Image (tube, grey):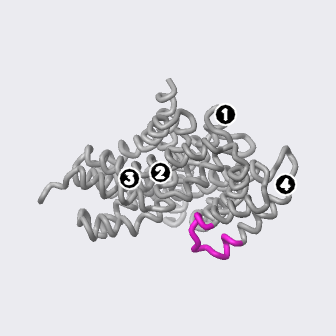
Amino acid sequence: MIYLALFYEFFKVGLFSIGGGLATLPFLYKLAERRPDWLTVQTIADMIAISESTPGPIGINMATYAGYQVAGVFGGIIATLGEVAPSIIIIVIIAKFLAEFDKNPLVKHAFYGLRAAVAGLITFALLKLLSATLLAGGSINYLNTGLYLVFVALVLVFKKAHPLVWILLGAAIGLILRLPS
Amino acid sequence: MKEISLWALYFTFFKIGGLTFGGGYAMLPLLQEEVVNRRQWASEEELLDMYAIGQVTPGIIAVNTATMVGYRKRGILGGVIATLGEISPSIIIITTLATILLRYKDAPYLQQAFSGIRIAVCATVTMSIIRLMKKSLVDLPTILLYLLVVASTVLFSLSPVIVVLVAILFGIVVQNIKHRKEGI
């Protein structure tokens, strides 16, 4: 049954992604590999754009969007509930038994490794995203690559700007240059 | 102490979820305003502790923090209700947007706009990674682990689940070796 499969897949995403919304990305790319009928590399890029430019936690927005694409309104709800279910279980256990969880040396040590690995996993997700956006059928799309470099420079200079600014600017440039999909 | 109503929990976190742009880190000021100043459900220190725990537990930081505040106030049901409040705006907004976008997905102007948006997204994600690398790659072992993770996921398509588990072990082992060296 599709709803059960959705719940199970997003339960796994919620259980293993640690450290913010983008940390769910590598799991979503893996999911796209296993279930291309659910998600494609391109829909993930659109999903990030929509999730970054709407209110709410990015990880939750992405789960709702992905679930909706797979199985409609109810699919979006089920995927989101699947993603938050591990949180509820784990937090209740920690709040009950481990009051000083974040100060535990073992947890601190684990995070020393975990943070670096999460940066690596999100880099993997970025490479997937870049290859879908900047490569067209194996060769480099120079226009897109040039635009990407300009955007990176802008984002680095205007660090404080909200992601929504960049997404709107991207949309405007896409319309002005009539970028092909 | 007066018992907090489940409705108040739901509504407060609905508001926080609906007003937070950009996920976990952007949510802290709103949490402070609502939970500490307005509702006085927790002191500043308690909230920061809960937020810190939310960051080091699996799942979405905003959801973890909501669950913890709800649980402290009204037990397991409180945790569930606060979380449902936090995620409700996302479900409503994203579902509405997705319905509209998927209906017009073949419109040329929408495709052109999204082609541009995808490039912008690549840049914002690049920025997030740079920020994350500055915080997390603090010495040689973490830099090596980072490179190893990138190589093994790209070249051998290693599962992220395995990466997470190995990284936890790696952190504990490397820190123990460091501490032992310092001890001698």
Q: Are marks 1 and 2 in contact (CB under 8 Å)?
A: no
Q: Are marks 1 and 3 in contact (CB under 8 Å)?
A: no
Question: For the residue marked with disc 1, what is the amino acid?
Answer: Pro
Q: Are marks 4 and 1 on the same chain?
A: yes
| Secondary structure of residue under mark 3 | helix
Which one is closest to the eye, mark 3 or mark 2? 2
Identify which residue, B144 or B88, lies in the foreground: B88
Q: Give x and y (percent) for residue B82.
A: 32, 51
Dot 3, crowdedness within 10 Å: few (<14), some or many (≥20)? many
Residue hosting label 3: B86
Residue hosting label 4: A141
Q: Chain of mark 1?
A: A
Query: Of the residues under marks 4 and 1, which one precedes in the sequence?
Result: 1
**Mark 4 to mark 1: distance in Å?**
24 Å
**Mark 3 to mark 4: distance in Å?**
40 Å
Q: In the image, what residue occupies the spot 32% across and 64% down?
A: B47
Q: Magenta part of the protein: which range?
A: A154-165
Residue hosting label 1: A36
**Mark 1 to mark 2: distance in Å?**
25 Å
| Secondary structure of residue under mark 2 | helix
Above or below, comparing residue B145 to residue B33 in the picture: above
**Mark 1 to mark 3: distance in Å?**
30 Å
